[in-house]
Image: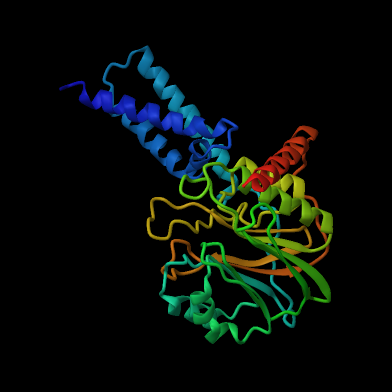
């Protein structure tokens, strides 16, 4: 009986260390990729285990020192991964105050959770904040109809309601010069491209919602990764002010997101400002950043915040931006090996999508 605490400690420690190691395996199967998400939670668990070690082993042997060392190294690695998304990390874009007469480009993104029928909370949020652009995900015809009380005030609309949890609704106060609804990887998963007139310039918006790597949706991350990276290529090719946003079903610190930043030249306004966790809204201990904004170097940040709950499993997220001169100082550089990896991932995703 005296060894039970020691056995429990060993089992928990080995599982925690394995959970840290699994995402380093470059395999697209969901069992590997799902461990990308809770990096912060794993870091906290390892810190608790490190402290508990000193109370668990009175006369530690060499193996117990080894497990402590492995825990410290694992916690250090996780801290390295999540540090850029703390208030102490280096920012990628500056935060400024807009000029007094300057219109701000503010965007509200919300995965509404299709089966959530408490429409009023989101309606009230839109009425209260009146953002210039709305992008709602997991929207079917019932959501489209229910939101008409507020979306009728938006002159420009792109509406793709679907019953498969991948419907999209887009609304803008700013003029939309042209737009496309694309099915980049999967015939059932739409995304949008919209050219907005803002500040006497054309801003290209990419709104996406790829499938997550979970058994009930998609057992692999292949198609998700391909869609994210393909949109990044399109943003880079545009070469003018661009924003990529939506529920990417990927976290800010994943390898795919880093490859996206490097290949697209986009910047992450989260960095140096916090994690801005948007999922899961129902469970405070299981939260990570799934909903994102990535911007080209033409933008400066006015504000960014996670909004109050609308009874979805996601919190809405908001960003306010203005255009200034292009500043590429904080763009991440990409190696030839990484460029080849991006091309390979896109090709694999397209092939898998065609096969389905």
Looking at the image, the residue that sits furthest to the top is 62
Q: Which of 318 and 223 is in front in this view?
A: 223
Looking at the image, the residue that sits furthest to the left is 1
Asked if 167 appears above or below 264 in the picture, the reply is: below
Residue placed at 49% from the left, 39% from the top? 35
Q: Nearer the viewer, residue 184 or 232?
A: 184
Q: For residue 60, what is the image quadrant?
A: top left
100 relative to 72 in the view: left or right: right
Residue placed at 68% from the left, 47% from the top? 354
Instruction: Count numbered badges in the picture.
Output: 0
> Residue 105: where, in percent of width, then height?
69, 73
Q: Quadrant of the N terminus?
A: top left
Asked if 22 appears above or below 150 in the picture, the reply is: above
Let me know if residue 88 appears in the view. Answer: no
263 relative to 143 in the view: left or right: right
Asked if 21 appears above or below 188 in the picture, the reply is: above
> Residue 73: where, in percent of width, then height?
50, 27
Let me know if residue 321 appears in the view. Answer: yes
123 relative to 52 in the view: left or right: right
Q: Which colour scheme is used?
A: rainbow
Q: Which of 188 and 129 is in front in this view?
A: 188
Residue placed at 80% from the left, 34% from the top? 336
Q: For residue 107, what is the image quadrant?
A: bottom right
59 relative to 145 in the view: left or right: left
Q: For residue 235, what is the image quadrant?
A: bottom right
> Residue 163: where, in percent of width, then height?
51, 66
> Residue 284: where, in percent of width, then height?
39, 55
């Amino acid at each position: 009986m005296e060894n039970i605490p020691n056995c429990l400690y060993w089992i928990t420690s080995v599982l925690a260390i394995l959970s840290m190691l699994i995402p380093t395996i470059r395999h697209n199967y969901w069992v590997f990729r799902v461990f990308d998400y809770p990096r912060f939670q794993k870091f906290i668990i390892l810190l608790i285990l490190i402290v508990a070690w000193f109370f668990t082993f009175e006369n530690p042997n060499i193996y117990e020192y080894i497990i402590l060392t492995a825990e410290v190294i694992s916690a250090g690695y996780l801290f390295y991964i999540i540090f850029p998304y703390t208030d102490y990390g280096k920012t990628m874009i500056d935060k400024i105050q807009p000029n007094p007469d300057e219109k701000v480009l503010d965007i509200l993104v919300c995965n509404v959770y299709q089966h959530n029928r408490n429409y009023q909370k989101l309606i009230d949020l839109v009425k209260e904040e009146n953002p210039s652009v709305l992008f709602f995900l997991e929207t079917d015809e019932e959501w489209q109809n229910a939101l008409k009380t507020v979306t009728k005030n938006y002159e420009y609309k792109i509406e793709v309601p679907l019953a498969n949890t991948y419907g999209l609704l887009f609304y803008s106060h700013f003029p939309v010069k042209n737009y496309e609804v694309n099915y980049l990887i999967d015939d059932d998963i739409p995304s949008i491209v919209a050219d907005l007139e803002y500040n006497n310039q054309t801003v290209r918006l990419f709104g996406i919602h790829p499938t997550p790597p979970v058994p009930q949706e998609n057992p692999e991350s292949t198609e998700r990764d391909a869609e994210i990276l393909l949109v990044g290529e399109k943003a880079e090719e545009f070469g003018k002010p661009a924003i990529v946003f939506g529920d990417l079903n990927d976290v800010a610190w994943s390898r795919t997101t880093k490859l996206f930043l490097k290949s697209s030249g986009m910047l992450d306004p989260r960095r140096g400002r916090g994690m801005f966790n948007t999922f899961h809204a129902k469970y405070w201990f299981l939260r990570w950043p799934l909903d994102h904004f990535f911007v080209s170097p033409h933008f400066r940040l006015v504000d960014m915040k996670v909004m109050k709950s609308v009874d979805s499993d996601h919190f809405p997220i908001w960003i306010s931006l203005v255009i200034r001169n292009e500043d590429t100082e904080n763009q991440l550089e990409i190696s030839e090996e990484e460029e080849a990896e991006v091309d390979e991932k896109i090709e694999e995703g397209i092939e898998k999508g065609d096969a389905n």
